[in-house]
Image (cartoon, helix red, strand yellow):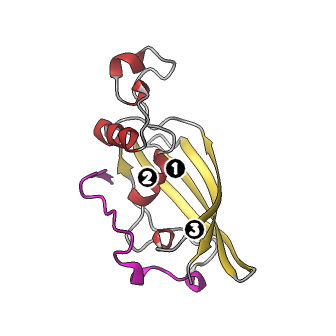
Amino acid sequence: MSEFDWEGFEQDFWKNAGRRKTWDQIIPGELRNTVPVTLTREVIRRFAEGIGDPNPLYTDETYAKTTPFGGIVAPPSIHIMLMFACTAEDDWMRSPGTINASQSWFYNEPARPGDTIRMVGKCLDRYIKKGRLYAIHENVFYNQRGEVVCSGRGWTIRPE
C-alpha cells in the first residue's frame, strides 16, 4: 500500500509500451496486477482542478460538512486516475493506441481523503469484429472497509 504520489505519477503512457501484453496475451478471467493507494486531500483537490470541476464538495471542508456527505469527497470520475495509479506501468490497459469504445460505471460509496483504494480488474472477454481487436474489461474499486466505491465495465479497441 502506498500514498498516491501525484508528482511521481507516470504520465508518459508510451514508457514501457514494449513490456505490455499484446491482445493475444490477454487472458480472460486473469486478474490484473494491482496495488492499493491511499487518497489525500491534495490528490482530490488537484484531480478536481485538473478536470475543471470547482465544486466545493471536493475542496472546502467547512462547506462539505454541511452536505449529506459530511465531509470532503472525491469527484466520482477519480476512478479513471485510480485505475492507472493502482496498476503497474506494464499493465495492458495502458497500451498506447487503445481506444475506449464504451464504458458503464456504477457509483456506490464516495472516495474520501484517507481512503485506501484497491482495484480488482480483469478482462472478461476478447473478440475480433470487422478486423478490430476488442477487449471487455471489468474493474471494481474497494475502500479499506471492503465497500465498493465504484464498479464498471469497459469495451476497448486494442492496438495490434
Between circles 2 and 3, the one closer to the viewer is: 3
Q: Quadrant of the N terminus?
A: bottom left
Distance of label 1 from label 3 (alpha carbons): 22 Å
Where is 86 relative to 95, above or below?
above
Distance of label 2 from label 3 (alpha carbons): 18 Å
Q: Which mark is residue 82?
A: 2
> Residue pushed farthest top?
66
Location of residue 98 by image quarter? bottom right
Q: How crowded is the residue under tag 2: few (<14 C-alpha within 10 Å), some, or many (20+)?
A: some
Residue 70 relative to residue 127: left or right:
left
Q: Which mark is residue 141?
A: 1
Region of the chain picked out in magenta, as a range: 1-25
> Residue pushed farthest right?
130
Where is 133 relative to 13, above or below?
below
Q: Which mark is residue 83?
A: none
Asked if the stretch drawn in magenta spans residue 6, the answer is yes
**Which residue is denoted by mark 3 in the rendering?**
99
The amino acid on which the numbered mark 1 sits, given as a three-letter code, is Phe
Residue at 68% x, 79% y is 132
Asked if the stretch drawn in magenta spans residue 79, the answer is no
Location of residue 16 by image quarter? bottom left
Between circles 2 and 1, the one closer to the viewer is: 2
Indicate which disc, 1 or 3, sits on the residue closer to the N terminus. 3
Q: How crowded is the residue under tag 3: few (<14 C-alpha within 10 Å), some, or many (20+)?
A: few
Q: Tell me the SS state at disc 3.
A: strand
Residue at 59% x, 75% y is 158
Where is 95 relative to 150, above or below?
below
Q: Quadrant of the C terminus?
A: bottom right
Where is 14 relative to 108, above or below?
below
